[in-house]
Image: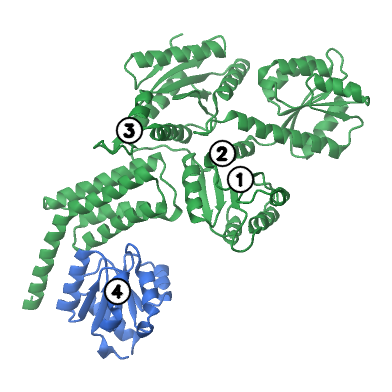
């Protein structure tokens, strides 16, 4: 997998306002092809068909939270190795280490800047796959 | 700024505006979640929901650069986070602080919605200044893998002012012991590790720790094999499931009072100086506190001062024989249950039995063997303490019961007389309590009672005595206190209690919370002849408080 193939992002976030901002940030500004899910359950239903290059998951959600969603998605054979990133307000070094240990490339801090978050995602992608 | 960026900014502005419109709705959600917790209790799911809502609010509003809202929500989210993690409900002071934070959040939303230009920072400093110092709270380690039971116990026991730390596995509990020792342990018998894992853990605990930590076992098994294991492991109590939480709480309080009461107090009455000193030495080495009286005629006065938990008495003494003295002691209601152990050369069983009939509990024949003396005394003193605490606590509130308070009042009068010190006796009565029960139901009434008990125990000193005198009546003894000091403290408590928002679940009523007040009468000693007069004076002052319109503190005029 090389840096050229970051196109489809599966985004899981329950708060509609953040979904809307992320859509602007990732589609309008970042140029990605975004598919938004409001819950882990919804993500499980559509993920395989969408063929995401990256899983972008909010941590704190009702029901299945981010980590639980990632765990479930990873069980699908098509998604076992799909890179993932978490979005959360918790960004202490040990917390970041924890999220990485769950199988994420990195953690995006909330609140994120809609104008620059796409660049941030791209740079994380590049640094992991070069 | 290029075209695309401009378009994006416009879109973001539009989103920001529509989010601002949604804010009041978000606040309603937070309030609803909070109401649910106040009705149903601080069990973790409801608490997690509230925390998540507030956390999300903080994050999203920050994204839209609504900093006032974001800051207020952050503060509240940070406050809630430890509560979610420990599952502990907030104490009274924390509750008020939280109310302040919620109000601040609402305010920030209102201001944002009205598009106030400057961003106000929110001041949400705690409204109460004093709490009991942390070290006065007992630390309880709860080792329980059943999450639900752990939550229930944690919440209920927390209400009595204990600090509860929960561990889901024995290993975590044992690791924690290396950092800090609890005042008591509540542990389940059975864990995934094994059906006696609890017992094993307690045995290991005894190895790490140099003193005995009161331990309560919980299990669904009730057979003697398991109970024996518990006893052998050093357990002090055993509760079967489903756990009677009130009973457990009462037992725990008793055990903790035992702990804070210190070493067993043994009184030695023997006319032989050398023998009495010998007994004192042997018992002292076993960790007990002793008081010697070589003259039975003076023994009574010493008993009043020393408040012994067991009296070791020689039968044959000049002036007043042991069994006569025992009879006199038993005349005093206060000491009717104190174990009396006779020591004598008397080997005649019939005569021994006769002495026992006069108020003794046991007989030790001279010459006394050290181990026999220690074990007899220890087991009786220990059982006496447990019995005492069973008889003396109110099960709903954990406070001392009526009888105990009256005893303490008499003791305090006697002590103040001898030491020429002053103290204050206060009687509190909740105003219109009957209508609280009628309007909101008895369970809610009980919560109000528990709430007041908690307030009193958390805010008063360790040396103060707090008891539940009757249905909605409480009594407080404040040693070494002047009437002015007492009036000030109690008036503050009066106002704080009045400010508490109690929650009810009466569906018909729009307002989900209500307030309750109390009236209080205080009387100071010296100023009255004896405990009864003091009691009456406080009672009259309480009556005057009610007559004066309630929600007030009145000092008795002597």
Q: Which mark is residue B432?
A: none
**Neighbourhood count class around disc 3 (C-alpha, 10 Å): few under 14, some 14–19, many 20 upward:** some
Viewer-closest of B238 and B205: B238
Shade representing chain A: blue
Q: Chain of mark 3?
A: B
Give the residue drawn at x 41%, y 25%: B490
Q: Chain of mark 1?
A: B
Which SS class for mark 1? strand
Lower position in the chain sequence, tag 2 or tag 1: 1
- Tell me residue A116's x, y (percent): 21, 75
Which SS class for mark 2? helix
Label 4 sits on residue: A43
- Dot 1 and dot 4 residues touching (CB under 8 Å): no
- Dot 4 and dot 2 residues touching (CB under 8 Å): no
Which SS class for mark 3? helix
| Of the two numbered discs 3 and 1 in the rendering, the one whose residue sits closer to the viewer | 1
Lower position in the chain sequence, tag 3 or tag 1: 1
The image quadrant that residue B189 belongs to is: bottom right
Which SS class for mark 4? helix
**Neighbourhood count class around disc 4 (C-alpha, 10 Å): few under 14, some 14–19, many 20 upward:** many
The image quadrant that residue A1 belongs to is: bottom left
CA gap between label 2 and label 3 equals 31 Å
Residue B91 visible, this angle? yes
Viewer-closest of B186 and B55: B186
Look at the picture and state if B316 lies above or below B276. above
- Tell me residue B296's x, y (percent): 80, 17
Q: Are marks 3 and 1 on the same chain?
A: yes
Viewer-closest of B277 and A110: A110
CA gap between label 3 and label 1 equals 38 Å
Label 2 sits on residue: B247
Q: Which mark is residue B499?
A: 3
Shade representing chain B: green
């Amino acid at each position: 997998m090389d840096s050229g193939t970051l196109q489809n992002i599966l985004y899981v976030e329950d708060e509609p306002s953040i979904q809307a901002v992320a859509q602007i940030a990732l589609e309008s500004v970042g140029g990605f092809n975004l598919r938004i899910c409001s819950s882990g359950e919804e993500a499980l239903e559509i993920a395989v068909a969408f063929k995401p290059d990256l899983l972008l998951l909010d941590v704190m959600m009702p029901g299945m939270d981010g980590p639980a969603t990632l765990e479930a998605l990873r069980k699908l054979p098509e998604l076992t190795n799909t890179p993932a990133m978490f979005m959360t307000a918790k960004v202490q070094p040990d917390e970041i280490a924890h999220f990485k240990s769950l199988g994420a490339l990195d953690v995006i801090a909330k609140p994120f800047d809609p104008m620059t978050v796409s660049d941030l995602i791209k740079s994380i992608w590049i640094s992991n796959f070069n | 700024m290029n075209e695309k960026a401009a378009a994006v900014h416009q879109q973001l502005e539009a989103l920001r505006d529509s989010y601002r419109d949604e804010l009041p709705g978000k606040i309603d959600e937070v309030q609803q979640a909070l109401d649910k917790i106040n009705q149903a209790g601080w069990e973790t799911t409801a608490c997690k929901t509230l925390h998540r809502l507030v956390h999300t609010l903080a994050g999203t509003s920050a994204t839209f650069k609504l900093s006032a809202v974001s800051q207020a929500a952050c503060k509240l989210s940070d406050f809630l986070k430890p509560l979610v993690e420990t599952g502990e409900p907030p104490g009274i002071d924390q509750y008020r602080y939280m109310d302040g934070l919620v109000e601040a959040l609402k305010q920030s939303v209102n201001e944002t919605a009205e598009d106030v230009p400057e961003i106000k920072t929110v001041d949400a400093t705690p409204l109460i200044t004093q709490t009991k110092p942390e070290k006065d709270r007992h630390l309880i380690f709860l080792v329980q893998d059943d999450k639900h039971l752990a939550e229930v116990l944690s919440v209920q026991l927390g209400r009595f002012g204990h600090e509860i730390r929960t561990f889901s596995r024995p290993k975590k509990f044992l690791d924690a012991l290396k950092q800090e020792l609890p005042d008591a342990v509540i542990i389940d018998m059975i864990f995934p590790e094994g059906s006696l894992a609890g017992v094993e853990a307690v045995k290991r605990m005894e190895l790490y720790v140099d003193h005995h930590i009161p331990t309560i076992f919980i299990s669904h098994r009730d057979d003697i094999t398991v109970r024996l294991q518990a006893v052998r492991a050093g357990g002090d109590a055993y509760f079967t499931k489903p756990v009677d939480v009130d009973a457990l709480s009462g037992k725990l309080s008793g055990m903790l009072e035992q702990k804070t009461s210190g070493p067993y107090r043994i009184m030695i009455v023997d006319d032989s100086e050398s023998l009495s000193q010998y007994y004192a030495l042997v018992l002292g080495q076993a960790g007990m506190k002793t008081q010697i009286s070589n003259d039975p005629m003076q023994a009574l006065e010493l008993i009043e001062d020393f408040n012994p938990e067991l009296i070791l008495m020689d039968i044959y003494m000049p002036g007043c024989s042991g069994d006569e003295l025992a009879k006199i002691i038993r005349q005093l209601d206060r000491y009717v249950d104190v174990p009396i152990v006779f020591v004598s050369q008397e080997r005649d069983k019939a005569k021994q039995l006769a002495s026992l009939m006069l108020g003794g509990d046991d007989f030790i024949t001279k010459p006394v063997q050290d181990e026999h003396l220690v074990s007899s005394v220890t087991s009786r003193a220990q059982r006496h303490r447990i019995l005492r605490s069973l008889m003396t606590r109110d099960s709903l509130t954990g406070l001392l019961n009526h009888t105990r308070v009256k005893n303490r009042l008499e003791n305090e009068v006697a002590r103040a007389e001898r030491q020429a010190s002053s103290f204050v006796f206060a009687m509190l009565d909740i105003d219109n309590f009957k209508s609280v029960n009628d309007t909101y139901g008895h369970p809610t009434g009980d919560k109000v009672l528990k709430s007041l008990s908690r307030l009193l125990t958390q805010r008063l000193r360790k040396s103060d005595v707090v008891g539940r005198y009757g249905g909605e009546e409480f009594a407080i003894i404040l040693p070494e206190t002047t009437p002015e000091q007492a009036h000030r403290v109690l008036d503050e408590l009066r106002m704080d209690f009045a400010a508490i928002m109690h929650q009810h679940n009466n569906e018909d009523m729009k307002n989900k919370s209500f307030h309750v007040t109390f009236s209080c009468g205080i009387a100071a000693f010296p100023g009255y002849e004896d405990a009864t007069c003091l009691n009456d004076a406080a009672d009259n002052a309480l009556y005057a408080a009610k007559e004066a319109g309630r929600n007030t503190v009145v000092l008795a005029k002597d």
